Image (tube, helix red, strand yellow):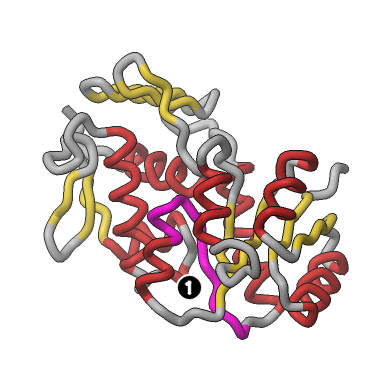
Amino acid sequence: MKKTIILLVDDEPKIIRFVKTSLTFEGYSMLTAASGSEALAIFEEASPDLIILDLGLPDMDGFHVLEAIRAYSIVPVIILTARDDEKDKVRGLELGADDYLTKPFGAKELEARIQAVLRRVEWSPQPNDITEFRLHRLYVDFKRRRVQSGDLEVHLTPTEYELLRTLVQHTGQVLLHGDLLTRVWGEEYRNDLAILRVNVSRLRQKLEEDPRQPRYILTVPGVGYTMPSD
């Protein structure tokens, strides 16, 4: 069985040793980079399955690395940062990160985040699931994981796709904030409204003709979100 390849981007030797040792023990194949430029070079050459990206790098801001990756790839990215600042977390999510983890952290917490993100990538349709969905100009083919808005194919990150899939599977129902967070991210995210709002915003930017007047993902103020049936 092919090992999952993880690229760790961090310039702190202690963090590199800790994460590399912990995740190698859990069966992952590890690559490391101590700068943004090195990370981008390794990413292009090795095509890792997941990236753990520190924001504070010596040569360029981690946000710039994330932007460069998202310009042509939807590979899962977990931001690793010492910045306990809501603005930094939100900006990372807005640029397409799938999750974030604030230093200091434990090995079990990191692996749980990795497994949660990889589950979104590896998800496959179940027998009773909807196989395709159409609403106005939106078309989703769940068998092929393809999303179209009009004639254009839309490329979603694993997290964005799982959020869309969850909304579609409950078309016509109002999903509470906590329920959506639990279904897509996990129980430990149940109160993390920031990660939900940012991902809904990103989905609207990619799917809606006018994100300011959405037709597909509707807000129920103070309650949650819903996708209409027609």
- Residue 177 pos. (x, y %): 28, 62
Residue 146 against residue 126 in the figure, above or below: above
Could you tell me how many numbered marks the image carries? Answer: 1
Which quadrant does the C terminus fall into? top left
Magenta span covers which residues? 92-104
Residue 227 sits inside the magenta stretch? no
Whole-percent x, y for residue 64 in the image: 52, 55
Q: Is residue 35 left or right of residue 83?
A: right
Q: Give the residue displayed 78% in from the left and 82% down from the top.
A: 14
Direction from residue 220 to residue 146 in the image, left or right: right
Of all residues, the one furthest to the front in this rendering is: 59
Residue 46 appears in which quarter of the rendering?
top right
Tell me: 16 left or right of 103. right
Vertical arrangement, residue 143 with respect to residue 58, above or below: above
Report the amino acid beneath label 1: Glu
- Tell me the SS state at disc 1: helix
Q: Which residue is outermost to the top? A: 151
Q: Give the residue at mark 1.
A: 188
Whether 141 is drawn above or below 69: the answer is: above
Instruction: Pick whichever, 64 or 188, lies toward us.
Output: 64
Expressed as whole percent of the image width and height from the top left, the position of residue 108 reads: 69, 76
Residue drawn at (17%, 51%), measured in percent from left and top?
219
Residue at coordinates 59% horizontally, 50% vertically from top-left? Answer: 76
Residue in front for this viewpoint, 61 or 75: 61
Task: From the viewer's perspective, tell me whether residue 117 is left or right of residue 87.
Answer: right
